[in-house]
Amino acid sequence: MTILSKDAPAEISHPAHPEHKLKLMATGAAEFQCNVCKELGAGDRYTCRPCDFDLHSDCALAEATLVHPLLKGREFQLRLEHPRHSDAGGRTCGACGGKVLGLHYHCAAKKGMDLHPCCAALLLVIPQEELTLELRKEASHRCSSCRERGRSRAWFYRSTCKTVYLHVACVKEIARRNRGAGAGESTDPFASVKEAALQIYRAKDESELERVILELVLGG
């Protein structure tokens, strides 16, 4: 899920690929794996075609330090090297719960925390006319998509009316499944997430809600 700034440069140099400059490419909904964070992505990317090297724009343009508005009192440092696993499970992203396999932000304070660059760049608010979603560190309700409860999957998007709750991990999965199903060519990386949240919000009863969730799981 790439959130691209209008001021993104057309060409950059990056220490992860010093051999050539990387060019900003508009590639629609085509999926790729970022060569530095190892996470899947789609849409605009920085690329070196001769070397088949791709970067999320969030990874390519990540600042050396990060202070996140949801994490007061923490300062994160950008790390390019692969993390050294301190336990069998390895490190996970504090926002989505996914494994940290490459480029990441790390804060050593308070028992340590890591963030994928793309998760660190997630919008705090996803606005739309009927239903607005806000990013939160935790929520007491179960996720409207996977129906799981608790903090095991970390951050949530919650609707301002407090009726729709979506794990960041589920938001990423909804976007990925819709890309794989060829659902639309919108330039809005959150288009499928907005539509999914609206369908959940509009469900009239539990039976309709279950149908909507099944469609989300299957990418329909």
Image (cartoon, helix red, strand yellow):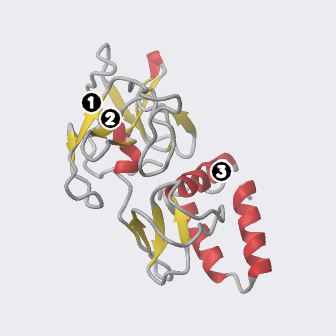
Residue found 45% across the figure and 16% down from its top: 51
Left or right: residue 89 compared with residue 57 = right
What residue would you read off at disc 1?
12
Circle 3 SS class: helix
Quarter of the rendering containing residue 213: bottom right
Depth check, mark 1 against mark 3: the one in front is 3
What residue would you read off at disc 3?
177
Measure the C-alpha gap from mark 1 to mark 3.
30 Å
How far across and how far down the image is residue 131, in percent? 49, 79
Q: Quadrant of the C terminus?
A: bottom right
How far across and how far down the image is residue 82, in percent? 39, 24
Task: Relative to 177, say whether 192 is above or below.
Answer: below
Which amino acid type is shown beneath numbered disc 3?
Arg
Task: Relative to 111, say whether 16 is above or below.
Answer: above
In the rendered structure, are the residues bearing label 2 and label 1 in contact, judged by CB atoms less than 8 Å apart? yes
Pointer 2 local density, CA inside 10 Å: few below 14, some 14–19, many at least 20: many
Circle 2 SS class: helix
Pointer 1 local density, CA inside 10 Å: few below 14, some 14–19, many at least 20: some
Task: Relative to 49, say whether 2 is above or below.
Answer: below
How far across and how far down the image is residue 40, in percent? 53, 38
Residue found 72% across the figure and 57% down from its top: 217
Of the image marks 2 and 1, the number of the one nearer the N terminus: 1
Pointer 3 local density, CA inside 10 Å: few below 14, some 14–19, many at least 20: some
Depth check, mark 2 against mark 1: the one in front is 2
Circle 1 SS class: strand
Which amino acid type is shown beneath numbered disc 1?
Ile
Of the image marks 3 and 2, the number of the one nearer the N terminus: 2
| Residue in front for this viewpoint, 178 or 119 | 119
What residue would you read off at disc 2?
60
| Residue in front for this viewpoint, 22 or 69 | 69
Of the image marks 1 and 3, the number of the one nearer the N terminus: 1
Left or right: residue 132 compared with residue 110 = right
